[in-house]
Amino acid sequence: MLTQIDSKPLRWQRTRYSPLTRQLDVFTACGLFMFFLWWDRSLANNTSGQKRKRAIWLVKTMLDLGPTFIKIGQALSTRADILPLEYVEELEKLQDKVPPFSTDQAVAIIEAELGNSLFTLYRDFDEQPLAAASLGQVHKARLHTGEDVIVKVQRPGLKQLFDLDMQAVRRMIQFCQRNFSWSKFYNLDELYNEFFMILYQEIDYIKEGKNADRFRENFKNYPGILVPKVYWKYTTHTVLTMQYLPGIKADDRNQLLAYGIDLKRVNQLGICCYLKQILQDGFFQADPHPGNIAVSVEGNLIFYDFGMMAEVKALAKDQMIKAFFAVLKKDTDVVLDTLIDIGLIESVSDMKPVRKMVKFLLEEFTEKPVDFQMFNQIKEEIYIMFEQQPFRLPAQMMFILKSLTTLDGLARTLDPKYSLVACAQPFVKSLTISQQRGNLVGELAKQARDFIKFRLQQPSKTEVLIRRLEERLEEGELQIRVRSVESDRALRRINLAIKTLIYICWTGFTLIAGAILLIGNYQGWAVFVLVLSLFGLWMSVRSLFNLAIRERLDRIAES
């Protein structure tokens, strides 16, 4: 008899969970988090400790809300260039530290699905799960034929929870569409349908097994890519048995270095592998977070999870091939035209800011690490672009962008000096010598050869400088900017004075309202409003103090 693993049930694991309650839980969680961020910003309390506190709360809330929101957290956990470090470190715990369900439940599901007792099916079965993911958990086992395998068991009640989440997220989207103008720039309905379609596919382990077989067939001639074998005799819609391939977590830099693994080669393998998946195969893993990719002690990549896979249509592949090589050649016009064709950018009357933004990205970041401070150089263009709102996110592109940004974050974790161009070179070289037939391969080979010619015909540094100077003169970018320091100081003082006046008005209004409520014998409400008045008084005093300091500093600077 296997020992039960104790685990405290989370809110989303309740057996009875009504749609109304689920919707309230989702809206309450989102509202509370936004309130916490506003509160911290109002009190200027953005210390590392406070961020850690909020991040811990967010992780706990995502765990309470369940698999749909855990998936969102997993995507964010590799984006150290977007989120503060405290949030990244806490969100990483969603990768492979999700609480497991009991072993007795897992065994009951296996026996019911496979129609036999556990030890009739497997010679050995580890009751302690290797990992617990948002959709299921994995146990190591051994078949009677001697092969070591992993047994993936789906969490009980998962489909019912997804049905509730569909309703809750549907209502949230409708709320945004009614109340926020920014929602009209994004096809939220199509994104919603695509997201839940893939989530439902991910909980069908028969589908996942077929995906794994197809993925392994695509990489059968690539020894650097390892894909576990599926044992179909021990697989159903909610139980999946696969070959056991142990490895080191892909973002564990210290462990990889300890084994003497070449991190640049790992990045190269990962980038070339994904370029092949998207540009050649049109079939790619849409969720490449560190919990789904490992590295063997020999330095090869191991892929584990094949539930969230996506396909690219042939037309989109042709466009992406052109866009990829245009990025390598830094051809702004082709990149911009392709982004418009695939619907990622909407054509507006003045495309100059968008064009300059694309050109800046191609010049600065394709061959070196991203330095976000450099965006100050084009902050005016960024502001104009966000006013125009030319960017859109078509549903078919959502998972491609998610995969590439996640993989990019993982690559930069392993090698801060990571370069897309350098890592893509083996893929480009393989295309130039490809003898395969077909329009797609022919287009790839043509673009690869054109790129090599482009690299060999690069102009000298002097020619590049002269060309850039001519472009800046033509676009009217060389201009003299005059700024009045005194005016800036006066505007800052006026801003502080207005804020102070607002706080004083707030204090006076709530004080009068509290007094009226107290006279009218509404003691409970009166106490609440008077507390708000005290808060306003404290903010008023704080703002007056800041204003006095600002005036004194300005007088010192002007003297």
Image (cartoon, rainbow, N blue to C red):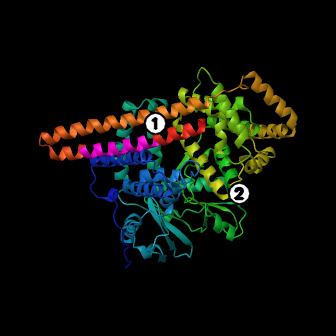
On the image, the x and y values in percent for residue 496 come to: 46, 36
Q: Nearer the viewer, residue 429 or 490?
A: 490
- Point out residue 473 in the picture as x, y percentages from the top left corner: 76, 23
Q: Residues within 10 Å of mark 1 (few under 14, many from 20)?
A: some
- Density class for disc 2 (Cα within 10 Å; few <14, some 14-19, many ≥20) is few
Residue corresponding to mark 2: 222
| Secondary element at tag 2 | loop
The part of the chain drawn in magenta is 530-546
Residue found at x 73% / y 26% = 478
Query: Does the stretch in magenta take in 266?
Result: no
Report the number of discs. Answer: 2
Q: Considering only order in the chain, which callout, 1 or 2, is on the residue closer to the N terminus?
A: 2
x%, y% of residue 127?
44, 74
Q: Which mark is residue 496?
A: 1
In the image shown, does 221 or 401 lie closer to the viewer?
Answer: 401
Question: Of the residues shown, which amino acid type is indicated by label 2?
Answer: Tyr
Residue depicted at x 37% and y 30%: 178
In the image, is residue 368 above or below residue 121?
A: above
Q: Report the predominant secondary structure element of the magenta stretch.
A: helix
- Please say whether residue 384 is visible from this viewpoint: yes
